[in-house]
Image (cartoon, grey):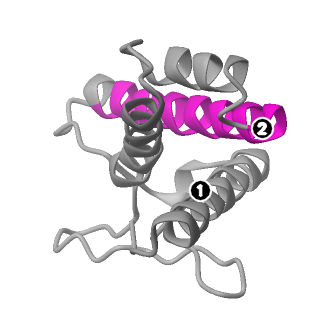
Amino acid sequence: EPPLNSFGSFVLQDTGKARDGLDIKGVLAQIVDVARLRSLQYGVIEAGTLERLVVLAAGDHLLAQTTAETADAFRTLLNLRLAHQARRRADQLEVDNVINLEDLDPGQRKQLKRAFAQVKALQENMQHEFGARS
């Protein structure tokens, strides 16, 4: 599940370290997995997540709005993850995938919530279609 509670607030992960945060890689992997599963389902051979989404939409296997929102969520999560890792590297800290909310401005937090909501919608769709939790 994306780290949002039922009220839309972030749920921080206990990392066992001095700081808690959001595991951005785990949520990003959910989008990658959905794109892979849908690609297998419809015989799409493209390798990249964004490329898979485009081909799935072109083949009418995903709605254009779903594709656009999912691609936006993927880019948002990937950009936040890479920026976080670059900051950690520049500060000579261990590079990880745990985003600290205090490092994000209000606009980034809003983007992050929107991305998490899209991942949740994808998961619910997969659960509805296949009858299993993703």
Q: Quadrant of residue 8?
A: bottom right
Bin the neighbour count of mark 1 within 10 Å (Cα to Cα): few under 14, some 14-19, many 20 and up.
Answer: some
User: Magenta segment, which residues?
Assistant: 63-88
Please tell me how crowded label 2 is: few (under 14), some (14-19), or many (20+) other residues with Cα within 10 Å. Answer: few
Kindly identify the amino acid type of the residue bearing the numbered disc 2: Leu
What is the magenta segment's predominant secondary structure? helix
Is 69 within the magenta?
A: yes
The disc labelled 1 sits on which kind of residue? Leu
Q: Which residue is mark 2?
A: 63
Nearer to the camera, 55 or 7: 55
What residue is rendered at 16% in x and 74% in y?
16
| Residue at the farthest right position | 65
39 vs 5: above or below = above
Kindly identify which numbered label has been placed on residue 76.
Answer: none
Disc 1 target residue: 122
Determine the secondary structure under disc 2: loop
Quadrant of the snapshot with the C terminus? bottom left
Spot occupied by residue 113 in the image (x, y as percentages of width and height):
68, 59
**112 lies left or right of 98:** right
Percent position (x, y) of residue 97? 31, 45
Tag 2 and tag 1, C-beta contact below 8 Å: no
> 36 or 18, which is in the foreground?
36
**45 above or below 3?**
above
**Relative horizontal placement of residue 58, taking residue 23 as reference (left or right):** right
Work out whether residue 3 or residue 119 is closer to the camera in this orientation and state it.
119
